[in-house]
């Protein structure tokens, strides 16, 4: 069982928007502005999409955005494209004993 | 542009020690802005953080693996390494090395599959 809870799957049609949630606790997501999101295509390494809750690395499309409310972080993908079909993982700092925890991952299907 | 490449045996026997090395190119492992980490992914499952190391040698481990994990750095070779002792089938996974900046894992190696089996 993963430390952070994500829905197993979400789906959307091209052009639509979807949101993936990542629920933690007051010891991780709720305590630090250090949630990151990763995209992983089959057989490939994860790719950083969002860091520090809502910042985009250079080169990542502005269709990807991050937000947080309390113990739940969210990744929103707008204007869905076929290439967005992938697994998405959230990650959060969880203090100086546990350090880093991942969510169980969410499979995004483009209909 | 940083690049990371994992290397090591793809098959390890139960109870033995898994050893992997990550070679960093395109930048110095002694860059004070970076930490270096190992993350694994069992087949069909999610990501699990194993641990991080700073170029100075400071280490940070997943509490659930801490008793079996050692991460070390060799600045002269621009490499860092992972040792996981007393492995079982549950340690079968793709092992990734990654660089950590901005408190996120920004660059990843391609991953290497390690199977624990006799």
Image: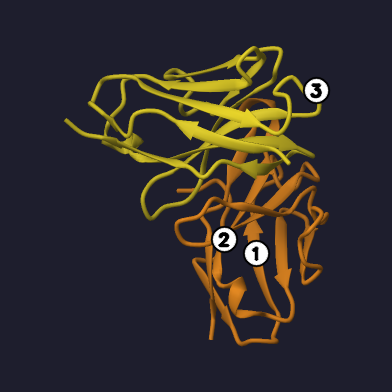
Chain colours: A orange, B yellow
- Label 3 to label 2, Cα distance in Å? 33 Å
Local secondary structure at mark 1: strand
Cβ atoms under marks 3 and 2 closer than 8 Å: no
- Asked whether A111 or A43 is in front, the reply is A43
Question: Residue, x 71% and y 63% (percent of image)?
Answer: A74
Indicate the chain on which mark 2 is placed: A
Name the mark on residue A21.
1
Quadrant of the rendered image containing residue B2: top right
Cβ atoms under marks 2 and 1 closer than 8 Å: yes
Question: Residue, x 26% and y 36% (percent of image)?
Answer: B89
- Asked whether A36 or B9 is in front, the reply is B9
Question: Residue, x 58% and y 50% (percent of image)?
Answer: A4
Side of A27 relative to B84 (left or right): right
Name the mark on residue B32.
3
Question: Residue, x 62% and y 72% (percent of image)?
Answer: A84
User: How many other residues sit within 10 Å of disc 1, few (<14), some (14-19) or many (≥20)?
Assistant: many
User: How many other residues sit within 10 Å of disc 2, few (<14), some (14-19) or many (≥20)?
Assistant: many
Side of A64 relative to B82 (left or right): right
Q: Residues at marks 1 and 3, common chain?
A: no
Query: Please, is residue A74 above or below residue B78 in the view?
Result: below
Mark 2 lies on residue: A6
Quadrant of the rendered image containing residue B102: top right
Quadrant of the rendered image containing residue A106: bottom right
Cβ atoms under marks 1 and 3 closer than 8 Å: no
Please, which residue is most extreme toward the front here?
Answer: B26
Query: Please, is residue A24 above or below residue A18 in the view?
Result: above
């Amino acid at each position: 069982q993963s430390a952070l809870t994500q829905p197993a799957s979400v789906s959307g049609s091209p052009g639509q928007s979807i949101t993936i949630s990542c629920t933690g606790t007051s010891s991780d997501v709720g305590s630090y502005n250090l949630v990151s999101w990763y995209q992983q295509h089959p057989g490939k390494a994860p790719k950083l999409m969002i860091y520090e809750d809502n910042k985009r690395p250079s080169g990542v499309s502005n269709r990807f955005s991050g937000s947080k409310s309390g113990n739940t972080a969210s990744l929103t993908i707008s204007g869905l494209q076929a290439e967005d079909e992938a697994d998405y993982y959230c990650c959060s700092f969880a203090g100086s004993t546990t350090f880093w925890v991942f969510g169980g991952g969410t499979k995004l299907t483009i209909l | 542009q940083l690049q990371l490449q994992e290397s090591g045996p793809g098959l390890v026997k139960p109870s033995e020690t898994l050893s992997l090395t990550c070679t960093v190119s395109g930048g110095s492992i002694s860059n004070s802005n970076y930490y270096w980490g190992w993350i694994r992914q069992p087949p069909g499952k999610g990501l699990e953080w194993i641990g991080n190391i700073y170029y100075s040698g400071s280490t940070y481990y997943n509490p659930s693996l801490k008793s079996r994990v050692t991460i070390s750095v060799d600045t002269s070779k621009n490499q860092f390494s992972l040792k996981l002792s007393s492995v079982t089938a549950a340690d079968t996974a793709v092992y990734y090395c990654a660089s950590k900046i901005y408190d996120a894992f920004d660059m990843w190696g391609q991953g290497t599959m390690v199977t624990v089996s006799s």
